[in-house]
Image (spheres, grey):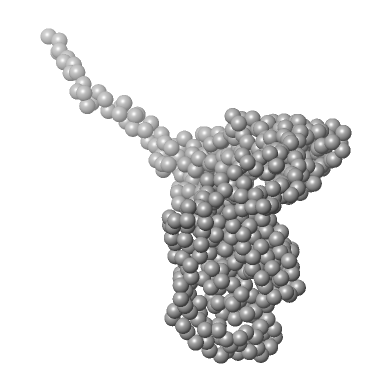
Amino acid sequence: MPRSTTHHAPTPREGRRPRLRTAAIATGVVAVAAGGLYVAGLVATGDDISAGTRVGGVDIGGMSRADAEAKLAAEAPAAWSAPIPVRVGDGASTVTPASAGLTVDLAKTAELAADPSRDPFTVIGRLFSSGDREIQPVLAYDADKANATVAELAKKNDRAVREGSVAFREGKAVATRPVAGQKLDTGKAVETLRAAYPTTGASPVTLPVAVTEPKLPAAEVTRFLDTYANPAVSGPVTLTAGADRLRISAATLGDHLTVKNENGRLAADLDAEALLRDPDVADPISSLTGAPVEATLGVRDGKVVVESEGRPGHEVTAKALGDAVRPLLTRSGAAARTAAVTTTVTQPELTSGSLARLGITEQMSTFTVNFPSAPYRTTNIGRAAELINGSIVQPGEVWSFNRTVGERTPDNGFVDGTMILDGQYRSAPGGGVSAMATTMFNAMFFAGVKPVEYGAHSFYIERYPAGREATVAWGQLDLKFRNDTGKPIYIKAGATDSSVTVSFLGTKKYDSVEAVAGERTNLTKPKKAEGTGKACVPQPPLEGFDISVDRVFKNDGAEVKRETFKTHYTPRDEVTCKPVDEPAEETDAR
């Protein structure tokens, strides 16, 4: 019988062994190849940074981080440190990056440029890459420095809006051109600088600003200059009144022209009243026109009469002056800037026909003071009488000696004379006017009007009525009265070389006014003193005393009122003079 044969299926291990061996051999070959590539990749890429790596155009490929940092520091692109041109509104400036806290962090930039991985796949992959690597620099930012730099830019470039205007100075039209205001937005400016760094071109970096436009455009300033301001002061204007001519200079015109902005449009105004008061205009106008001349009054048989008739005057009012000048201001050329000015006829207040109506019908009082003749008295008392004569005091009005006579100076017609200064006779301007003041006080006293301010001499002067005399001192002591009669008062004053007389003409309020003097009391002995200075005047002694004087008002012979005036006089010391060079101080007048 034939022998049977049995076949067995191979086990899995046995069946796969050849394939595994083949795969293992293949894997080994790949590993060997990959290892070679990896080693080659490490050699090719260098220590830390791959070949072909650049930062800002600087080649740092194949370098270590430290070497790359050193090379970037040595060969840093100019843009990293070059001043950054900036524009702030209409202004140009530059910003140094480092001072603004804008720099490149070289260490972090080198770190960024280093290969991100050393694994075989990355290293081997770089062997087959083509082209360079460009790494963006890592920027550093110091907020405090940036804010400080931007704040300094704001300080230099911020400005408030300037409105346009036109003014007149020294006869010229002076224009102020409008300028827009600008304010740097500091917060946004910092971010703009950060975004622009490092700059790549020469164009300036525009920083954000808020602009405030002026309300008045430049074109309006130009229009006003051309159509009004420049013509207004292009030359003088000439006004005519009959055959008389008045020339007003451009400088004087400019002093009284003002310019206003009226809803975005410039307009000018002439202050005619101020122009009329200006001495450069007032003085010529006074001679060109002339005030009315009042009638002069006198007394005949106890009645007021006209001694010389008044005559009308011609006046230029502020309105007439403005109406004549304003149309000429927009014209050029001498002929075009000439026009007639309207004058107003002004009648005198006092005429023969107005006396009865005014109530100036009788002499209310009259008083005369005699004095030793001396040239300075003749001059000073005569000048004071001249200034007072013809004064008209309306009902309720206060009359003032100082306001009427003015300061006693050479320019006002006064000379040096003897006065009481610091309790002694001294030489000073206006000496002797106390005779005028005393005469005026007594005329006021007997007219029965109300005294407002008065003062007696410090010591008694024998030629004056005790307790019924007055002195004045410019800026210190005045003589004033109020007209409480209900009718106007005319003051008539005149002087000779040895006397001065003042009369009040009007309507009496009382039939008569009398003076009743009391006894002298509190008698005080004088002393002896030695005066100094060239102005010293010797004086004889006189005792001091107190005295009261009653002013008694009567109607129909009966007393209706009484007022008491009390006066204290200091002793008049005996003074001998010892001249020295030092001038004496001046105080009140005699």
State the image coordinates of residue 564 (x, y, percent, origin top left): 44, 65
Q: Nearer the viewer, residue 124 or 165?
A: 165
Give the side of residue 111 with respect to residue 400, left or right. Answer: left
Give the side of residue 529 with respect to residue 9, left or right. Answer: right
State the image coordinates of residue 392 (x, y, percent, origin top left): 63, 49
Check the picture and name the quadrant holding the N terminus. Answer: top left
Image quadrant of residue 487? top right
Q: Of all residues shown, which one is farthest toward the left? A: 1
Residue 452 lies, with reference to residue 248, above or below; the image says below
Image quadrant of residue 384? bottom right
Q: Nearer the viewer, residue 452 or 201?
A: 452
Check the picture and name the quadrant holding the C terminus. Answer: bottom right
- How many numbered dots are placed on residues in this image? 0
Residue 224 makes an appearance in the image: yes
Residue 213 lies, with reference to residue 419, above or below; the image says above
Q: Residue at x 54, y 38 (%)?
A: 209
Q: Residue at x 53, y 46 (%)?
A: 486
Q: Nearer the viewer, residue 40 or 244?
A: 244
State the image coordinates of residue 24 (x, y, percent, origin top left): 33, 32
Q: Residue at x 62, y 34 (%)?
A: 261
Q: Residue at x 43, y 81 (%)?
A: 522
Give the side of residue 9 with respect to residue 141, left or right. Answer: left
State the image coordinates of residue 493 (x, y, percent, origin top left): 67, 59
Residue 133 makes an appearance in the image: no
Residue 187 lies, with reference to residue 468, above or below; the image says above
Q: Nearer the viewer, residue 156 or 194?
A: 156
